[in-house]
Image (cartoon, coloured by chain):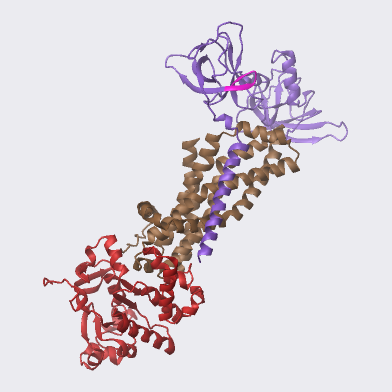
Chain colours: A red, B brown, C purple
Amino acid sequence: MTEPVRTTLDDPALVRVRGLTTVLNGKTIFDALDMDIPRGKITAIMGPSGTGKTTLLKHITGQMRADAGSIHVNGDNVAELSREQLYKLREGIGYLFQNSALLTDFDVFENVAFPLRQHTRLPEVLIRNLVLLKLQAVGLRGAAQLMPNELSGGMARRVALARAIVFDPMLILYDEPFVGLDPVALNQVLKLIRTLNQTLGITSVLVAHELEAIKQVADHVFLIANGKVVAQGDPKTIASDGSPWTRQFFGGEADGPVPFQYPAGDYAEALGFAGAAK
Amino acid sequence: MTVREPQRNNVVSQSLAQIGACGLFLLTLLAAIPRSFRYARETIRQLWFVGAMSLTIIMVCGLFVGMVLMLQLYHVLSIFGGTSASGMVVALSVYRELGPVVTALLFAGRAGTSITAEIGLMRATDQIDAMEMMAVDPIAYVATPRFLAGLIAMPLLCCVFCAMAIFGGHLVGVTWLGIDNGTFWSNMTAQVDVHTDIVNGVLLKSLAFGAVVSLIAVFQGFTTPPTSEGVAYATTRTVVASSIAILALDFVLTAFLM
Amino acid sequence: MSQQRSSYAVGTGLFIVLGFAALAYLATQTSSVANVHQGDSYTVQAQFTNIGQLKERAPVKIAGVRVGQVQSITLQPGHDVADVKLSIDKSYDHIPQDSVATIFTSGLLGDQYVGIQYGTAKQAVAAGGTLARTKSTEPLEEMLGKFFGAGSVVDNVGGSYSVKASFTNVGSLSAGAPVKMAGVVIGSVQSVHADPVKLNAEVVLSIDKRYDAIPDDSAAAVFTSGLIGTQYVAIQPGGSPDVLKDGDEMILTQSAMQLEDLIGKFLVNGSPGDKKDAGNGK
């Protein structure tokens, strides 16, 4: 933890997490978590439900503060930034929400234009061109005048993606980008993630469960359980790694290091057989 | 960032915790005012939603309040031949009490609930978080414009309400019940005082009510659990808390101002 | 979208204009802006033994026309007169020094104001000067109180007996109204109904057993408490040695009077309570 954690432009890691510890409502989410997210790559973060994968993304963007440890994004310690610096940092981060989080007041065009209008004073023509460019990239230029409630889930996610990349960020965080998509939409999103990463060199972080999809797209996988990284590596090697965690997770076994039963008292006692058990 | 759930041991400490949290939220709102200047356009848009869109209900209700008030007063005052004073009594009771209070109650029902539900849904669908992520301060962009819009809209709505009530009173009193038109106006102008009745009554009270109602509405929207059940509950609470706050504040203001 | 935005702006602008128009309407059409308008003025003092309900900012009038307002009302410790400062418009600066300042009531129920009746002195009262001659508030309540019995809370009536009384007019007297003697409640009206034969109102009075020594030639009258209060029956004791008993009828009755009649009589006769001193004015 005392090693130098600064990341610079030539540092291979864009996000460097050291000793991250978070306790929420008495439950330990992260226990001295260390993680390096490589620059320019697609990184997937996997783990059983409730291990705080979304929480980790919120730590990276400074929406939540950790109880201990540090997170450096492109050389800045997120916890030490002032509000203005934090907002400056966030302009360089795209975030794709699980449920797209489009602003329901505005149509598709204005949703994508929203960050531009808030942070720049560009002429209307330029805004229009930028927005149409991004909408074209996600294949929805024709849907510019639709309202968010007229979009399907997959379309809404692509609009949200267009909004997330409108500033050409250095980092995109995808929170469960594949949930609830039909195979066609899923492949479209996969292709987009791959294209954005390759053409723009955007570092991408995916939080997802879909093993097959991740195998196709990710360069690097972190498996988190019990607040620690239990396995990491490229998707093919990690799948064949023999540890009980990876076996359960990638093999889809119901019981293993992750218990099927939520922690509970003695079963016989709960059913009223306490006397009999004695 | 995590908001601790207040201990649910009794109603009193829970209410106190709510009031305290609401007060702190007000400070956050006020502190965000300079930052929300760049979102002036949003304030105008909210002024349209909470103010101009409430105009119809306010005008109709004002008209009926004035009409029924005149009808009642006419019958009471006719017992001792004081019907000529009824226009004046309508004006005074509307300016001092009914105008601000009824406008505020209607405002809480019409605009307050929609503010709470809108913000609650924005939270439930991660729109607030999305703004945070797009480096747009949700307090300055969502909360403060709605608060300011409520603050500006209430006195204006109250003036419209009072004018409609006078119009309704005139309609019933002069046109239907046959009070002399000149007596109606001269009694009113003789007794209504610009300072005590219009500035202290209409404007100051409605400004205070507007602040309280929009604060409660925005606060409930921001603090509700982001679930459909939470939003429904928060909307109800906005109406209940606003109504109590309006009537309690009305008593305090009346005691101090009159 | 920008078109949509400008429509918001226009609508909001219209709303604001409408709101301010309503405010202007309230301020100019339904209140007298003159009430708040204060041009150049000067201050005159007057002392009153009783200011009644006079308030600060009440009007000051000459010949019924507003010329200023009451600036302040103070009571010096150790004095028994109130110091009233009158703020009068500069254009009325020739008020004779011996003018009389009087506290009037506008109408029967209206607010009180200070009226100034011009005197004959050549010298005008100076700014900051004092109007020495004043008349305090007209004791309307006192005068009327001499007419009417003062109301009081109904005693808890124990045993009671009933007497009848006929009136040609009971006004708005209704069952349950108090029956008073010397201004004190001694019973209540049990029933009021019209007599189909005699064509008058027959009122049954229920009187507390404790008051069993009321002479049988006493008179019953229908009075009103205060100016706009409820009506009640007042019993004026006679001089007969015999007393009223249960079921008796009172012969001498005085019907309800119209308020206008009462005031008219009072104004004509000048002296209150010449024959109607039923209640002993408190």
- On the image, the x and y values in percent for residue A88 come to 29, 65
Task: Classify B87 as above or below C69.
Answer: below
Magenta region: C60-67
- On the image, the x and y values in percent for residue B85 come to 67, 34
Q: Is residue C229 or residue A241 the one in the foreground?
A: A241
Q: Is residue C132 or residue B6 the one in the foreground?
A: C132
- On the image, the x and y values in percent for residue B73 come to 67, 40
Task: Classify B203 as above or below C233.
Answer: below
Say which quarter of the image contains residue B170. top right
- On the image, the x and y values in percent for residue B23 come to 37, 51
Say which quarter of the image contains residue A260. bottom left
Q: Is residue C179 or residue B9 the one in the foreground?
A: B9
Name, please, the residue furthest toward the right. Answer: C197
Q: Residue at x 57, y 8 (%)?
A: C98
Q: Is residue B41 visible?
A: yes
Quadrant of the drawing holding the C terminus of chain C:
top right
Name, please, the residue furthest toward the left. Answer: A2
Q: Is residue C157 magenta?
A: no
Q: Residue at x 53, y 64 (%)?
A: C4
Q: Is residue C281 or residue A228 the one in the foreground?
A: A228
Q: Is residue C64 magenta?
A: yes
Say which quarter of the image contains residue C206. top right
Q: Is residue C133 left or right of residue A138?
A: right
Name the main secondary structure of what is drawn in magenta.
strand
